[in-house]
Amino acid sequence: MSCKVVLAQSISASYREELKNTVKDRNIRPKLVGFLANDDPAAAKYAEWTAKTCAETGIEFELRKCLRNELENKIVEANQDSAVHGIMVYYPVFGDRQDQYLQNVVDVGKDVEGLHHKYVYNMYHNIRFLDQAQTKKCIIPCTPLGLVKVMEYVGVYNGILPYGNRLHGRVVTIINRSEIVGRPLAALLANDGAKVYSVDINGIQEFHRGVGLKLKKHEVTETTLKIEDVLPLSDVVITGVPTPSYKVPSDLIRDGAVCINFSTFKNFDADEIKKKASIYVPAVGKVTVAMLERNLVRLYDYQIQESTVAAS
């Protein structure tokens, strides 16, 4: 079986073009502020990449560097500045629960990363809108959202099924259960109908909406399954293990599976995985940045709507 390698640049192209046209046609210039309060080279690189991408799209990006003990006050200042439409922070800052606190200091109306408790709660409870009229969609964290868009692009989602059920019958294994990507992604995919095996060093959990998708939101059950049990069952394998030494055992992957890597490192052996997978996506970074910009434009529109209502 020949494997098709799909690059993030190809997936993000249509979103970036749509963003460029939106900004140009509407003559708007949403402003995104990124806060860098650590010495992480990867964060600095991500900031550089974000600045370049925003410039190409027509979005204003400003990187504000500060000491970590100054960060909270700097975020509050940006919250109160009507010229700032979106805020992001390059984590980790303190590397503990103080980072979770900072995620909630960011104004929910400017949180392009979707890390505020309101968005996190809604995501896990399968609440997709911020308002009763369902005119304002919730903001979803950028990398999990980007991975959803990757799966839509390569045809994992079934467009014939009703919205919200389009992964019904799909089995997905996610090797990563971080609070930033792995667990939110498992919840999103299970809420869309998939059976998800969430793998981390402590074991495997199953995320699902029950037989016939009878549950309104996903539930989580502990299992005694091993990686060798779930990989052969999986239509999709997604991995984000942050170490160069980890490789997914290719021999366990079913023929024709879709394999997606979101780690900085290559968790799949490229030569081996191409012998098993039907589709291989080696990285998703460019899709993540496109979702960041997309979230910004959405929040910009919400702010304009609110200011119009307040003025009337």
Image (cartoon, grey):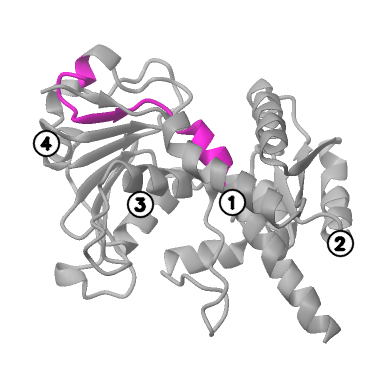
Residue 170 placement (x, y as % from top left): 19, 52
Please name the residue shown 75% across and 54% down the image.
Answer: 27
Q: Which residue is mark 2?
A: 82
Of 71 and 54, nearer the camera is 54
Q: Secondary structure at mark 2?
A: loop
Q: Secondary structure at mark 3?
A: helix
Residue 79, quarter of the rendered image: bottom right
Q: Secondary structure at mark 1?
A: helix
Q: Are marks 4 and 2 in contact (CB under 8 Å)?
A: no
Q: Secondary structure at mark 4?
A: helix
Judge whether 132 appears above or below 159 on screen: below
The quarter of the rendered structure image containing the C terminus is bottom right
Q: Are marks 1 and 4 in contact (CB under 8 Å)?
A: no
Q: Which mark is residue 186?
A: 3
Say what amino acid the circle numbered 1 marks. Answer: Arg
Judge whether 305 appears above or below 105 on screen: below
The answer to which of marks 4 and 3 sits earlier in the sequence is 3
Q: Which residue is mark 1?
A: 294
Over which residues does the magenta segment extend? 272-291
Say what amino acid the circle numbered 4 marks. Answer: Pro
Q: CA distance from mark 3 to mark 1?
A: 22 Å
Nearer the observer, disc 4 or disc 2?
2
